[in-house]
Image (spheres, rainbow, N blue to C red):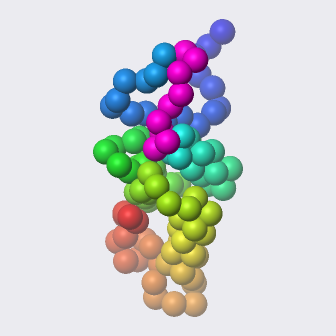
Amino acid sequence: ITEENSLPEVSLEAKLPNVGEKVTEEQLFALNLMYSLFAYYQVRQGTIEGDSLVVFLPGNLKVIFPLRGEPDVLLGSLRLIIERLNDTSKASRINELGISQVD
């Protein structure tokens, strides 16, 4: 058995709960958000830093999400920002503007 897998993972500095104990609301929010990011953008790694989930999208775009709010709104907003910044009909492409972080 190998330790490698294709599932997304979330790292955190805090101590994990013991088996059978619940994770915090913020940790559960991050896990659910990570599941959606994996499904939409194939993001495999996220880190909980303070009160944020930090992920890197393909193209090394750093995205910082709060650990509270409406997941559909956060993901929809990210999609809109990425689509607008990659609109080929305008001079607003992510790489051309040097954008490397969205928070």
Residue 95 x, y percent position in the rendering: 43, 71
Viewer-side residue, 11 vs 45? 11
Residue 73 x, y percent position in the rendering: 57, 68
Marks counted in the figure total: 0
Q: Is residue 87 left or right of residue 61?
A: right
Q: Is residue 102 left or right of residue 86?
A: left
Residue 42, placed above or below residue 10: below
Viewer-side residue, 93 vs 36? 36
Q: Where the N terminus falls, by quadrant?
A: top right
Quarter of the image for residue 86 reads bottom right
Q: Where the C terminus falls, by quadrant?
A: bottom left
Numbered range of the magenta stretch: 19-27
Q: Tell me what residue is drawn at x 50 percent, y 55 percent.
A: 57
Q: Does the segment drawn in magenta span residue 23?
A: yes
Q: Tell me what residue is drawn at x 37 percent, y 24 percent.
A: 15
Which secondary structure dominates the residues rendered in magenta? loop
Q: Tell me what residue is drawn at x 53 percent, y 28 percent.
A: 22
In this rendering, does residue 51 appear at all?
yes
Q: Tell me what residue is drawn at x 46 percent, y 55 percent.
A: 68
Residue 36 x, y percent position in the rendering: 64, 51
Q: Does the segment drawn in magenta span residue 98?
A: no
Quarter of the image for residue 77 reads bottom right
In this rendering, does residue 75 appear at all?
no
